[in-house]
Each structure stands twice: as structure tokens, then as C-alpha cells.
Image (cartoon, coloured by chain):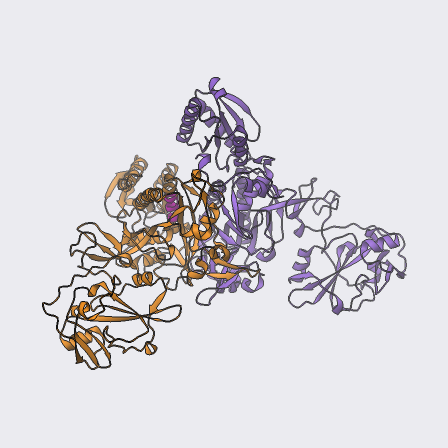
Chain colours: A orange, B purple
Amino acid sequence: MKVKNILGERFKERAFDIESQNLMTRGGYMKQVGNGIYSLFTPAKRIQNKIEAILREEMDRIDGQEVLFPVVMPATLWQSSGRFDSIGKELLRFKDRSGADMVLGMTHEEAAVQMAMNVAGTYQKYPFMIYQIQTKFRDEPRARGGLIRVREFTMKDGYSFHTTQEDLESYYDRAYRAYERIYARAGVPEVIAVKSDSGMMGGKVSHEFMLLTDIGEDSIVICPECGFRANMEACEAITENTADPVSEPLTEVFTGEAKTIEEVAEYLKVTAEKTCKAIVYQRNADDSYILVFCRGDRELNETKLTNYLRAEIHPAVEIENANLAAGNIGPVRLTTTATVLFDRSLVGANNLVCGANKAEYHMTGFDPARDLPADTAFIDLTKAVEGGVCPKCGKHTVKVKRGIEVGNIFQLGRRYTEAMGMTYDDENGARVNPIMGCYGIGVGRLIASVCEAHHDDYGPIWPITIAPWQVEICALRADDPAVREAADRLYKELSDNGAEVLYDDRGVSAGVMFSDADLLGAPIRVVISPKTVARDCFELSARDKSFREDIPTENACAAICSKIKELIDAVNAKVPESI
Amino acid sequence: MKVKNILGERFKERAFDIESQNLMTRGGYMKQVGNGIYSLFTPAKRIQNKIEAILREEMDRIDGQEVLFPVVMPATLWQSSGRFDSIGKELLRFKDRSGADMVLGMTHEEAAVQMAMNVAGTYQKYPFMIYQIQTKFRDEPRARGGLIRVREFTMKDGYSFHTTQEDLESYYDRAYRAYERIYARAGVPEVIAVKSDSGMMGGKVSHEFMLLTDIGEDSIVICPECGFRANMEACEAITENTADPVSEPLTEVFTGEAKTIEEVAEYLKVTAEKTCKAIVYQRNADDSYILVFCRGDRELNETKLTNYLRAEIHPAVEIENANLAAGNIGPVRLTTTATVLFDRSLVGANNLVCGANKAEYHMTGFDPARDLPADTAFIDLTKAVEGGVCPKCGKHTVKVKRGIEVGNIFQLGRRYTEAMGMTYDDENGARVNPIMGCYGIGVGRLIASVCEAHHDDYGPIWPITIAPWQVEICALRADDPAVREAADRLYKELSDNGAEVLYDDRGVSAGVMFSDADLLGAPIRVVISPKTVARDCFELSARDKSFREDIPTENACAAICSKIKELIDAVNAKVPESI
């Protein structure tokens, strides 16, 4: 394809803060149509097609069957799983012309069960996995970052069905490995799997595949010592307290206007570690209160609290009705209708400062073991911290990183097949609900993430396996008949040999041509100019600057094709074996 | 792939009247999820992928650039073209979580203009064509026939942009030829192009590609003499009247309860040809009346009337408020507020029976030329009829057939670029709206149509170029070690050689195995049984019964591969050259 024919314009001005959004906008890859809704120009669509081909190959390799579910589904289908009512506004609901309730598919567990229902009625039909590559819509309140977090996106989603937990687990391992292969083939072998929270999907075991980058929305807890990895949402927090030798008596002290932990600690000259903090939440359903006490230097993990309560929650908007002394709430002599919970970070600590449940006063000498009822439960409700204790190896080695989630896999169990009444007859003729797993990868987000991980100031550096074009020919001074002839011939030869070639024969300056080429990100560049013609050679260079050499005009096509193969082989060398 | 692993069940019981729906349901190709909404099982998805590959190749061949538009679009985009208000309920409108009006894309002219806007600002950027293959939703009131008329469907839609009408026309010719190639490559070279009505798309010249079949929803007018073809909606109707030598005077006659043309003609012993019929419609917008007079044996063409009035209309629900004598309406001495129109079928006729605008009375001797005002316009508002006059060659040779529309192409003109304000600078620096064409093919409907055109009582007969699998190996008595060994080896050899092979090694009867194979429709079948093993051969046969032969076990793979190539070549032999 010729650069002059590609629809879309490339420009120099910085467009956005997030680098993938900036470079893919400046490179003419996409255009916003609405909030979180994009059209893709040809360069992005070519990348998408290549990723889809990799996804198909890897899903077929683990015996997946490609199918297609609808984008628009009747609400009745989502009512049959209970999710029509349990999911929030991100599930877009509307009525069709007949007044029937409909939804836009944000995930397809219900559709997968509906497809498999009645056609997998005996145990001999198991296991099987069905997958699709299809448009999804999730009415995100906070679309951001170009293709990183959108409302409409293309997703590969797969659903496996099993008769035993062991069979699910063994298939889950194959899917896990297939995912590693997919990221490696897409040129981002650095993607890591982390244990994750299953959230609205149901099920117990799940992993997210994360690309570590500072612009990531997720916090990942990593232990460099033992390899432990988990999403912050799902990571156990371990706090080691060393108690003072003597537990002081509980004593009320005047603290005046000091209300936050920082203010109180400053006022009383103690560290935040030696305080006990109160955090108030409300249940979305009825605005009832939840009061959590934890060590003053710890942060509440909302996901853990949501999972513990099995209810949607939000930070308390006002606590006037809760009979609580805002800024002075404490665990002792407390009268409240709120659900009161204690975090594990308080275990083993003593001589803590806490609220006195009275304006302008706190207490010193709080000893949870002494001052709370003997049957008080201490549960894990806070976030792991940098330098904290690794839940796996027990060392103080925990690191917290940012990451973008580029895929996830879940062991769903019988959550959907039970709710929807899907059964098969087992060996003994008993009717049993099959066990499910599900496996998702968002295509657009993967594209943006690869760009995030592989770019320089001038544009994306696409891995050759997903680059929109493998080679770009830059014909400087295409008005020179010798340049034109050499460039036209090379373009034809490379194309005839199956290379994916972009050809820039516009009459623009070298500066414009090279900056456009940087933005389009072809891994190999061939420069042809009056100078190279005079030397009877072409200038070959890599977008990632890994090589730059002159190659003789003679046999240039073969040399470039073998360079393409070399780059592809280098990517594939990092792809693990399938299982 | 093994038959036993394909999700989906095949069964014998007739499921639906329309044969493609019946066979594709019985064959486990699809499952209904909601009204006009289907999931596709793997066999159908494989067909779809093959058709999509053909579409991509042919669109790329005519310099198309693949892009991707969103399914969900902001209403503002559709308001900018005026279609948010002008299109009926088939455009699904809803609000997102923020309360913003949104639509589900049923076509993407607006999205195409939005994409091209501001990135094609000078004449040098033209022409270009962008296309996508994407899910669409059209809230059809009458979904029917399985994949023939659905609400959600996958469509290839392309949009070209030009600076001159000549350039559009020359590109339109290329697209027309590309469409002929697509249908031929999909195994239905019998698809014909017919002139069509442009309807809600705007623009003047358009063609529909039709597969003639009795279950088709469209009426097609064809002249076998000169090759003229048009959709009934867009076909000029020509009526030749021979006037009686003497025009009788207008005379009121009693007709009692006779009200319909049949009753009146019977009562007065005249043919319907010698009557003038009144038809009453109402405008959707304000229920105002339209009264059309035509020859009694002619039928109103609603599309022509809609286009003439430039308004949405419906047959009158009641005419009490119109001051019209229902069943006795006539063109003479008529007092009404309705818009009164006369069809061309009345030109040259005389001595017609018509209503007398008075209960129980008609008139005889109506002579339009004599009895209507001299400036009366006679316009073309009725349908062409079987045996009628061909608008092209003028012979009485017209045939009326039924057809399924499997694609369409439109010359849109400046309808959208003007409305949305898309411009470019021409050679003289003037700002001009580009001219557009658009080009659509529904993938699911094409699949169903191919099945409609190519099947027998036992199942679809897929052309090899789109068949889900090229070859099916039927291993009868796979429990026989010799059969198992021969079948396993052939399966591996064929797969290794790139053939798309389905392998049935289930322990089922020959009857079940063959009827399932008929439903899955692989063009080539290889039967391996204890008998063929004893003869040291395989039984090779065609799904379409065009051959049936024994082939030696030795070199069987090569023989089958060359048979595959032969069948592909036979399809491709009917593909016209591209232009």
C-alpha cells in the first residue's frame, strides 16, 4: 500500500498525556466517535486482524471451536442468570421496538450456556470450549486513555465446559499457557499472570494477565524473592506488629481540631503505626453504615470489603445519621447501628491512639486484645503495602507496581449452569450441572498496551508479528527517475514475495517522510535516494534501531525477506511450548 | 475436526418451512437467542469466515481500505445527517448511563463521513474507499426465515469518496464487477444485478444483487428478450390502452352493494381493465389523505407513491373524515381535501366504469382525456405486471420473479457530505462536498441464500469455496482396527496437506453418519469401511452427486487433494475478470 493512499493524517503536535493514545492519535490509527467509542483506521485494523489471527490459532490449538454470539440479547437471558438485576449501569439496558427489555453484551457467559444448553446433554460430549471474537459494549463511567479503557471494544472470549473440577483445572492450565503464547507472539512476552479477584464473574480461581506500566490502572503486588504475584484487589495483606512491653491504660486526651490520622499523630507525637483508624462506608442498597477499624497507616481494600459483605458499597457520603463523632470515632464505648469490622492489621498491636467517640478527644493506650470483646474477629480488609510481608515466602519483600490488564481467565464453577438450569446426564444417569471456565482478551486494549510497552518519542515500535506493515520503503526524491524505478521495482518484488510493504513515494521532505514512518512503526525501513542509487545500494534500518546497514541493490529483496524472517523468528523464540 | 467434538446437534425432523432455515437448524448451524437474533455454531462461523475472506480480498482488489466503525454511535452523529429523525423504529435508539441519546448502527454512512472528515481536505486525497465487516442491528418488525431476515447481522459495508460524478461512476462499475466476482467465488454466479429504488439511502442510481428463489421477499421484473432487470419497486410500469372508437357519455348506474373492482366488474359485466379504481392512503406524519386513481386491474406501487410524495405513508385506516364515499369513489364531481393523483395506466383508455361519489352508484363512460381537467398530470404509480411491456425493449415480454437481495450498491451523491458539512479544496481552492458511493453485503443472508439455492432434501450442498469443511471422512465401523488405522492416517495426511477435513469416527450406524454428513454438506465424502479396506480402496463421492468412484488407498491423499483443486477451479472458472 502507498502512504499517500492511506486515509488518516499524521501530525507532530502532542495530543494526549497517555503515550499510546498520543502516538496512535498522531499516527492516524483511530478517531473518537463518542465518549469511549472509536473508529479504527486501516493501520489499526491491520494490527487488529493480525492479533485476531493469533487468537484464532491459539484457541484452535487448545481445541476451541469458533462461534458467534449476538451483541444484542434479550433481558430474559440475563435474568436467567440473575445478572440482569445484579450488575450496575455498565450493563446497557434498553427496550426494542416491541417494548421488550434488551441488553448490549458486555460478556457472554449467558449466551455460551444458552448455546450449549440441550446440545451437550450427556457426559460423553465433554469437555468442549467455544470462543468468539466479537464487539462488546460496557457502559464505563470513566472511559480514558484512548483504546486502554473504552466503552465499545472487540474481545476474544472463550467458555469451556467440564464434568469435573480436575478436568477444568487441567484445561485452565492449557488456557493459561495459550495466553502466554498469545502475548509472546504479539511481541509482549513480558506480560505476567497475577492472581485476581473474580468480582462479578463468580467462581474462585482467576488470573489476570498484566503488562506492567506506570499508566496502568491496576496495582499489582509482586515478590521478587519467590515470584508471588497478585492483583492488589486479591492480595492478602500481612501486618507484623510488635507490641510494647507494657500496655498503658486507656486514657482520654484532648486533641482539639485534630481529626485525620496525620493530624492526630502529629498532635500527639506518635507515628501512624501506633494509631487505630476508623473508615465509614455505606451499602448501596439501603445506605446502611459499615465501620471498619484498621491500623492508621493502612488503606482499606474496597474489593475485600465488598466480597466480605457480599454487597455493593461506597464511601459514606455523610454520617450525621450514624450517631458517630466524625474524626473522633473509636472502637471503645461505641454505640452505633453500623456494622463494625476489625482489620487484621490491629492484631498484636497495643498502646494505640484511637478516637474517643466524643468531639475534640481521642484515647491513648488502646490494646485491641485487652479492650475488645474476646470473640472479636479480625479479618483481612486492607491493602498490601510496598515493603510488606509476602504472603507466599513471608519475607518483607513485597513490591507494588502498576499494570494494564490485557486478559483474564476464570474458573467459574457451576455459577451459570446452576442458575440457568443447564445439565447433562453423568455415567450413572444423574443430572448434573457442568463446570465452566472463561477466558477473555480485549483486542484494542492489547494493541494500545503493546504501544505503551514498545514506543519511543517518535512513534510506536510494533513487533513484526502484529505490525500493520513489515517493511516501509521511503523513496526520497521519487521524482528522480532512477529512484522511482528502483523503488517501484523493490515494492513490486517484495509484494510478490509476500512481504507486507508500505511505500512512501510522496514528494515530501525526508523529515516529513521519516516522522510519518516513525508513527506508522513498520519494523524495517528501506531508504532509497539519489545517494543510495549512486552507491548502488539501499539503506536498511530497524525501527527499534537494532540495525542500520547498506545492502546491495542486487538481491535486496531476498536480503529484506530474510531480515523479516529473522525478526519473526526472534519473536517466536520467546513463545513457550503449548500444553 | 472430529464430528463428535462439534458442539451442536443434528436431527431429522422438519423444523421450518423455509428450506435454508430448516436445514441450517437441523444441521446445527445456528440457534435462536431472541426474535431475529441468532448465535452461530462452528459450521456456520467457518462459512462466515470464508465469505469474509473473499469479501476482504475483493474489496482490497478495488483499492478498499479496511477500517472499523462502532456498533454504538451517539445520536448527534445521526442528527448531523438528519436521519436520526427521518428513519423509523428500525433504527434502535436508547440512552446511555449519562442520559445521552445513542443509536445502534444499522448502516454507517454517517460514521464513514465522520472518519473521512478533516483527513481528506484536498482533492489530491481522492478517490478512496473504506470498508468494514461488522455487526449491525436493524430493529425489523418482521424477522423471518432464519438468517434471511434478522435483526442482528454481520455486514460488509463500503463507502467511496470522489471529486467527480464520472469518477464515482467508474468506481461504481468496478464495485459492480467486484460484487459479481464475490457471488461467483461464493458459488452463486447466478446472482443478478437489478436496478433498484434508493429508498432511505438517498442518491439516484442503485443496484440490488438478487438471488432468484420462490421464497424471496422482493419482486423482480425481468425481460428475457433484452436482459432488462429491475426491482419491482423501481420498475417503470407501462400500460398500453386501446380506446373504444366511441366515447360513451358519463352515466350514473345503480350498483348496489358492489364495492370492490371485482364486484363492480361482475355486476356490470365488464373486465377489470375497463374500470378505474380508487386507492386511499394517509401520510404518517399528519394522517392527511392521498387518493390515487388507476386502471382497475393495476396495483399501486407504494414505493413509487412514497418517493413521489417524499413522505412516509400507509394505507388509509378509516376514511370517515375524508368526505369520501367508500367503495364508490370516482374522479368526477369529487369534493375532497385529499391529494388526488392519477396513474399513467389511465392514459388512452375510455368507457371506463368508476365510482359516482354516491352510495350504491357508479358511472360508466368515463374518459380521462375528456372528463378530467386538461392540465391533469398522469404519473407512474403502479406495479409492472407479468406479460406487460418491457421499459427497455418495448415488447410484451415482462416476467415477474421472486428474489432475495444479497447485496446492494448505491450512488449516494452529496446527500451525506452536504448535510454533515464535509468538504475538500478543489484545484481552484474552492470548498466542495465530495460525492459518495456505498456498497453493502449481508454475510448471514448470503450464507442462507446459498443454502436456499444449493440444497437437496437431505441438507445444504455448499460450494467448496465456502463449505465449512472441504472433505468429510466417514469411518464406518471405526472399531475395526484396519478401518481405524486407514481413516486416522488419511485424516492426518489430508490435514498435513492443508485440506479442511471433518472426520466422523463415532460408533454410529451408516444411516446416522450419512445423514449427518448430508447436513454438514462437505462437498467431498470419503467412506472407509471393512469392505473398502478389503478392496484396498476408499469410496469417494460428491455431495452434489456429480461423481462417485473408488480410489486406491495408495496415493489417496494426493487424489483427494487434486479433486479439491478441481472443484475450486470449477467455481473460479465462473468468476469474471476484475476491472
Name the image quarter holding the N terminus of chain B: top left
In the depicted structure, whether residue A527 falls above or below residue A554: below
- The reply, left or right, for residue B31 in relation to residue A10 is right
Q: Residue furthest left?
A: A245
Question: Which of these two is toward me, A481 or B19?
Answer: B19
| Residue A248 visible here | yes
Across and down, in percent, residue A524 comes to 30, 44
Does residue B171 show up?
no
Q: Is residue B542 above or below residue B27?
A: above
Q: Position of residue A487 (x, y in %)?
A: 35, 42
Tell me where residue A530 sits by quadrant: top left
Q: Residue furthest top?
A: B535
Q: Position of residue A193 (x, y in %)?
A: 28, 50
Q: Quadrant of the rendered structure where residue A149 is?
A: bottom left
What's the residue at 19%, 76% (across, down)? A263
Overall secondary structure of the magenta stretch? Answer: helix
Q: Relative to B306, is A46 above or below? A: above
Q: Nearer the viewer, residue B383 or A136?
A: A136
Instruction: State which region is magenta.
Output: A45-55
Count of numbered marks: 0
Q: Is residue B123 left or right of residue B245?
A: left
- Whether residue B268 is situated above or below residue B2 in the rendered picture: below
Q: Is residue A54 magenta?
A: yes
Depth check: give the residue in front, B497 or B311: B497
Magenta segment: does it hold B4? no
